[in-house]
Amino acid sequence: MSNSTTLKPNSYSSYRWVILAILFLATLINYYDRVVYSITVGYLKEALQIGDLEYGYGVTAFQFAYMIGFLIAGRLIDLLGTRSGLSLSIFLWSLAGGLTAVIKGPISLSVSRGVLGFTQASHFPAANKCVAEWFPSRQRAFAFSLVNSGPSIAIMTCGLIVTWIVSTSGLNLSWKWAYCLFSAVGILLSILWFLLYRSNTQMIQGTENAGAVSGETVRWLDLVKVRKIWGIMICKFCGDPVWWFYLSWLPAYLLDKRGFDLKGIAYALPVIYGASVVFSILVGWITGWLIKRGMHPLQARKRMMLICAACMPISALAGFTGNGVMIILLVALACTAHTGWSANNFSLVSDCVRKEWVGSTTGLAGFAGAVGGVLITGVVSTWLITTFGYAPIFILMGSLHPIAVFCLYLCVKPEPLK
């Protein structure tokens, strides 16, 4: 496919959905490379003769590198363009993920997880930029919700894949092959993306929202002067820690405080994250429906985010009930509301800045979310749980989205449609 190739109007829709499917697969592999670390923790401890402390160093290395990577990744995606930038990103993080299969000790373990976090930080800025290039405003939340279903599906299926590789395949393969498999698939995807992807200005003529990849970047100082960007960053800072809290602490809460066993958790997680996938896509579709009926895109996204935020205080009751079914339903409400929130939060970026700057802005917002994750999920959550128990942290997790949506309405005002 040459750069001079153009798409006929009736081929435009088909091509962009193919691109979206590859983006979804890349997101899936991105999270497989993360989740496999916790799935194989027992094998890692035995093979490397390490304990919880050394394992935790690997988690911390990933989180901090991921946070710093966002600052560089967004600008790099804007500079290189979606095609080269994402292809390079997938290739590098796939190599980094595969490194875990050959590590020899706790230091190399932390280094490999840190490199993985740093290289993975560019994925969502690139994905958001791609959606902005190929989808009109009314379809972006729906399109991104499909891409953003990858994490939930990865969480539900990674354990099954690792189990199959290690024990049920009949091949007696080592756990290390799980890392090798995800690494190999990622490298193949990076090649496929580079061969197939073109920006829509290279592919079509006169089509709606045809955004060029100009290699132009924007200074962070210019971005932070924009009131709307602060609204988006606050939403990420407050929203992302909630997702990471349930991802990190829910199994321990169910095991230690509510009497669940591993089988019970295995049944609970598909319910929670399966509901997240369905609800996120539904919220994205409703947002597009509101925009199609004439509502301003910013107003439609804010309204849906307000509805999602209103669900969070209800979900905090999961920290106060002893009924197992109610706990799962309330946590599912929290996670589904957050995924619907997240799809619109990402889409706000392309509504507020030029498409050439979407990568840098998403990177800045992602940095804010990562800082919130480290501070709130890592530091504050650990302190509250060890000092006061789980009740205060559930209250906090139920309050963050309402605080964020209040700031969103203050900072992000829709401008008249031209």
Image (cartoon, helix red, strand yellow):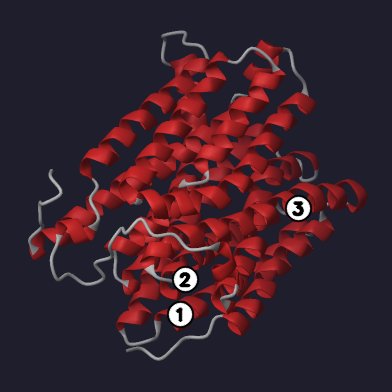
Q: Are marks 1 and 2 in contact (CB under 8 Å)?
A: yes
Q: What residue is pinned by disc 3?
A: 375
- Please tell me whether residue 214 is drawn above or below residue 26 in the rendered image: below
Is any atom of residue 232 visible in this view? Answer: no
Q: Is residue 32 left or right of residue 287?
A: right
Question: Which amino acid is tagged 2?
Answer: Leu
Looking at the rendered structure, the secondary structure element under dot 1 is: helix
Looking at the rendered structure, the secondary structure element under dot 2 is: helix
Question: In the picture, which quadrant includes the N terminus?
Answer: top left
Q: Which mark is residue 298?
A: 1
Rendering coords of residue 32 (x, y %): 49, 35
- Please tell me whether residue 22 is drawn above or below residue 362 in the rendered image: above
**Mark positioned earlier in the residue sequence (2 or 3):** 2
Q: Nearer the viewer, residue 408 or 159?
A: 408
Rendering coords of residue 82 (x, y %): 34, 51
Question: Which amino acid is tagged 1?
Answer: Leu
Instruction: Residue at 44% x, 57% y: name it.
Output: 359
